[in-house]
């Protein structure tokens, strides 16, 4: 275990270098639509891709997005054809998330482009994009962290935290690569 002697002074946090990509009215409109319509069980899955497109996302054909899926900023999201996103998935895209064709992001999975500089006394952002390549699978409750590329056909197994790139075809499970 490594100890840190950095004294936190969160009051000084500036958020320097983070651009939300749209103005406050668009952000507010998206949060209203997300929470009042997009995530609801009664909102038809076939209407979720067009709604994301209306807010600037690039979404391919035959994309299935289940209910309770959260997307931070649609305008920073690209999804290819024939993608499935399962219930309770969370796409925290402070930076771009790119999901290629034939990808499955399973129930409760989290793709998080945001982090903080742990040695910064004001805990400034340390964000980076995420890319999930063609045919990959991010299984139930798996987490993909900022800056990671999940390679073509790779699997991030249930409950696994991918904190560095996953090579094409690799299978990461809670027991390690397999």
Image (tube, rainbow, N blue to C red):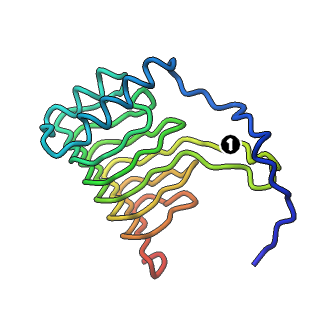
Please state which of residues 7 and 133 is positioned toward the viewer in this rendering: 7
Residue 155 point in image, percent of width and height: 37, 64
Residue at image location 69% in from the left, 35% down from the top: 15
Residue 167 point in image, percent of width and height: 49, 60
Q: Is residue 81 left or right of residue 131?
A: left
Q: Is residue 24 left or right of residue 104?
A: right
Residue 107 point in image, percent of width and height: 28, 59
Residue at image location 62% in from the left, 49% down from the top: 115
Residue at image location 41% in from the left, 45% down from the top: 91
Toward the bottom, the furthest residue is: 175
The residue indicated by pointer 1 is 125
- Quadrant location of residue 175? bottom left
SS for callout 1: loop
Circle count:
1
Residue 51 point in image, percent of width and height: 25, 27
Please state which of residues 33 and 16 is positioned toward the viewer in this rendering: 33
In the image, residue 120 sits, relative to residue 51, either above or below, namely below
Say which quadrant the C terminus sits in: bottom left
- Quadrant location of residue 76? top left
Task: Say few, some or many: other residues with alpha carbon within 10 Å of mark 1 (under 14 / 14 to 19 / 20 or more).
Answer: some
Say which quadrant the N terminus sits in: bottom right
- Quadrant location of residue 7? bottom right
Q: Is residue 129 left or right of residue 80?
A: right
In the image, residue 6 sits, relative to residue 43, either above or below, namely below
């Amino acid at each position: 275990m490594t100890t840190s002697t950095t004294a936190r002074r969160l009051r000084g946090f500036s958020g320097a270098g983070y651009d939300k990509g749209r103005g406050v009215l668009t952000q507010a409109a998206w949060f209203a639509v997300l929470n009042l319509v997009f995530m609801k069980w009664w909102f038809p899955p076939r209407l979720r891709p067009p709604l994301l497109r209306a807010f600037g996302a690039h979404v391919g054909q035959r994309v299935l997005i289940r209910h309770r899926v959260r997307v931070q900023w649609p305008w920073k999201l690209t999804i290819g054809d024939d993608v499935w996103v399962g219930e309770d998935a969370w796409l925290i895209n402070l930076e771009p998330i790119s999901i290629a064709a034939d990808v499955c992001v399973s129930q409760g999975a989290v793709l998080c482009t945001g982090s903080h500089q742990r040695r910064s006394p004001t805990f400034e952002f340390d964000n980076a994009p995420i890319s999930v390549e063609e045919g990959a699978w991010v299984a139930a409750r798996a987490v993909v962290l900022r800056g990671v590329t999940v390679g073509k056909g790779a699997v991030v197994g249930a409950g696994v935290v991918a904190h560095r790139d996953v090579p094409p075809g690799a299978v990461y499970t809670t027991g390690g690569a397999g």
